[in-house]
Image: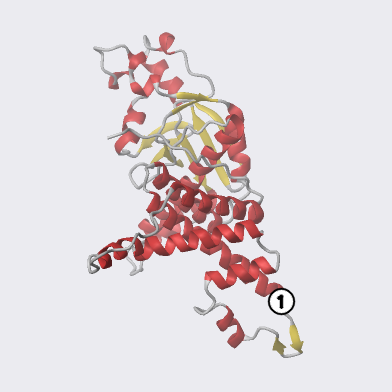
Amino acid sequence: METYICFYTTKPFWTGEKPDIESLISNADAFTKSLSEKTIEYENDSIYLAFCKDGLVMTRIKELESRRDEFKAQNGKEEPIPPAIQFTSEYLNYLNAIQVILSSSLLKVDNFAYFKNSSIRSGEAFTMSFKDGKFNSSGVPDNLTESFYSGRYLSQYNRNYPIQIDKRITFRRAIKEEVFRTCYDDLNLIIDDTEAIQMLSQVNSALSEYHNLNFRQSLVQSWFVIEYYINKKWIEFLYSKQAKIDTDKNRIDSTRRDFLTGRDMTSSILSNILELNDLIDYDIFEKINTVRGKRNVAVHNLDLIERLADKMKSKPGKKKDKRISTDDCWDAFLVIKDFFKTEYNLDLKMSGGFSYSTL
């Protein structure tokens, strides 16, 4: 039995050319077979990745799958996080990382900002199993995923209207093979680094909030990623300075290490030292300062608290606008892009635009 974890992007697509719907609607089996076809498949020692004709993404993360039985065996034991939840959470990180790289790949190849980077949640991802290469069973997905998945079957369309005007058909965009090849190549740059996968998942979440006009939350989530890489670069810098003072004493002993990695070493101090040692560029250093300041505003609600305090004044002074803006978010994304490029040689592309409906 082969098990795959699957998801659809929020905005659906055709893998390769759009199928000839006209020639398929007279044969329900042929319709389902065409839309379910694994149009493009990739595989190596770390991952299996397939893109079906109707845009379903199917994957097996082999390191995780090798531990599936281990997670099952832990059920019933007292754990801080139940094993089934931990396993699903880790898989969702990979799915969200795939999504952000797929979005980046489309921007690279066609300069087309189509995907919204909406976070893939539990219930939107689902399991499919095959036996001897033939479909055996699947989970029951939720929300839009359920609508797209049921769209593989002619019986799930309204017979009172032409199938061609159904949103699941007419709204899908054809995405060419080069995009998926780029996605696979870029994914392989970080597929064996679980921390990078987790950070990419957070980037996808930050982009999702940005595209949904929640700039405050987007910037806060972006800062979590930035702060991780500041600390990563700092630890690597300390490691490069480690040496034996004599045969039994390290230059950075446990006391010094605890201080240099403790609370007194703020992200502001670390980024200053990293820049002075040419480990981050000066323009990135300046953007980090800007983002950190705005992150403090957002996390501590400084702008809202100032408004409350102004009520005590007979003549409130004019305050500087401290709201989180699209420019603030974009500064954060540029820092993240730089970190992924320098750490993994991964050239992430992100869209600074967004589409919305006026209210």
Task: Find residue 67 and report its horizontal and vertical position in percent.
Answer: 48, 56
Compared to residue 292, the image places residue 262 above or below, namely below
Q: Residue at x 55, y 39 (%)?
A: 104
State the residue in front, 11 or 274: 274
The residue closer to the viewer here, 135 or 35, is 35
Tell me the residue that label 1 is attached to.
241
Give the structural element (helix, strand or loop) at label 1.
helix
Which residue is pictured at 56% across the width and 83% down the height? 259
Q: Quadrant of residue 268?
A: bottom right
Q: Measured from the top left, where is residue 27 in percent x and y?
A: 38, 12
Please give the name of the residue rendered at 63% of the width and 56% of the height, measured from the top-left corner.
283
Taking the image as drawn, is residue 202 in sight? yes
Label 1 crowd (10 A; few <14 / some 14-19 / many >=20): few
* Residue 296 position (above or below residue 335): below
Q: Is residue 331 left or right of residue 219?
A: right
Number of numbered markers? 1
Q: Is residue 214 left or right of residue 159?
A: right
Residue at 32% over, 38% down: 141
Instruction: Judge from the rendering whether residue 60 lies leftward or rightward of residue 44; answer left or right.
Output: left
Q: Quadrant of the C terminus?
A: top left
Which amino acid lies under the numbered mark 1 shown in the image of this protein?
Lys
